[in-house]
């Protein structure tokens, strides 16, 4: 039987996974923007050009997709480790957070188009197309891992609540305090 207890150590793994996922995601946007020559601010939950100058539509599409690619790669990396090795519950939040983050971003396209939605519009394939593909791929990884290790609903709900609460605190903190990292 694999360990599915929600402990303080597991909650801390969830905290680390959310912070890591958000920072590496925003860093990918920041780095891509900087590579195109734009002076960019990186906040905890967003990036923007310093002088208010927005890149060309092509640059915006590339900057927008760079971070979801990193998030999918994170999920894939953890999925492969969990698929090929023994159960490690402290890695699971890094997969679940990648899925949760991209699903949330996809749903936010109803309010404010971002990342995959922006790229989908640029490609002319509908706002939600890439969000559905990316979220579906990450959901598949979460589902296959859950099936392999027979993860129970209590563990899944606990993981969801940990990731949701920490993500919400991070997003709200950035909204109110505009936490600048770079």
Image (cartoon, helix red, strand yellow):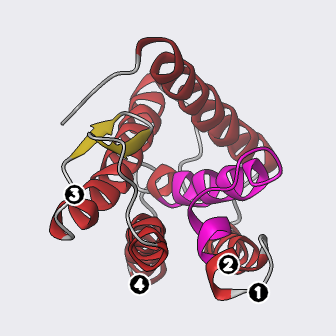
Where is the C terminus found, in terms of image quarters?
top left
Above or below, 5 against 35 in this view is above
Residue at screen point 49% across, 26% down: 170
Mark positioned earlier in the residue sequence (2 or 4): 4
Mark positioned earlier in the residue sequence (1 or 2): 2
CB under 8 Å between callouts 3 and 1? no
Q: Tag on residue 84?
A: 4
CB under 8 Å between callouts 1 and 2? yes
**Mark 3 Cα within 10 Å, few/some/many (few <14, many 20+)?**
some
Residue at screen point 41% across, 64% down: 67
Q: Position of residue 22 (x, y in %)?
A: 41, 45
How far is the residue under mark 1 from the one under mark 4? 35 Å
Provide the residue span drawn in magenta.
Answer: 95-119
Mark positioned earlier in the residue sequence (1 or 4): 4
How far is the residue under mark 3 from the one under mark 1? 27 Å
Residue highlighted by disc 2: 120
Judged by depth in the image, the label closer to the viewer, 4 or 3, is 3
Q: Farthest residue toward the top?
A: 176
Q: Between 130 and 2, which is closer to the camera in this rendering?
A: 130
Judged by depth in the image, the label closer to the viewer, 3 or 2, is 3
Q: Is residue 45 magenta?
A: no
How far is the residue under mark 4 from the one under mark 3? 41 Å
Q: Tag on residue 38?
A: 3
**Mark 2 Cα within 10 Å, few/some/many (few <14, many 20+)?**
many
**Mark 1 Cα within 10 Å, few/some/many (few <14, many 20+)?**
few
Residue at screen point 26% across, 39% down: 50
How far is the residue under mark 1 from the one under mark 2? 5 Å
Residue highlighted by disc 1: 125
């Amino acid at each position: 039987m694999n360990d599915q207890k929600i402990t303080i150590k597991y909650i801390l793994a969830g905290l680390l996974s959310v912070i890591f996922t958000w920072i590496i995601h925003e860093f990918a946007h920041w780095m891509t923007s900087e590579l195109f020559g734009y002076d960019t601010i990186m906040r905890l939950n967003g990036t923007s050009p310093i002088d208010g100058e927005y890149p060309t539509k092509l640059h915006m599409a590339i900057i927008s997709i760079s971070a979801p690619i990193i998030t999918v790669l994170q999920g894939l990396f953890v999925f492969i480790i969990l698929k090929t090795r023994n159960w490690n519950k402290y890695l699971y939040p890094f997969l679940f957070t990648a899925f949760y983050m991209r699903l949330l971003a996809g749903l936010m396209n109803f309010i404010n188009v971002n990342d995959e939605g922006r790229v989908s519009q640029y490609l002319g394939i509908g706002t939600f197309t890439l969000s559905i593909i990316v979220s579906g791929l990450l959901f598949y990884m979460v589902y296959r891992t859950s099936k392999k290790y027979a993860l129970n609903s209590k563990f899944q709900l606990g993981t969801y609540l940990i990731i949701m609460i920490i993500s919400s605190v991070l997003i709200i903190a950035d909204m109110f305090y505009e936490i600048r990292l770079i």
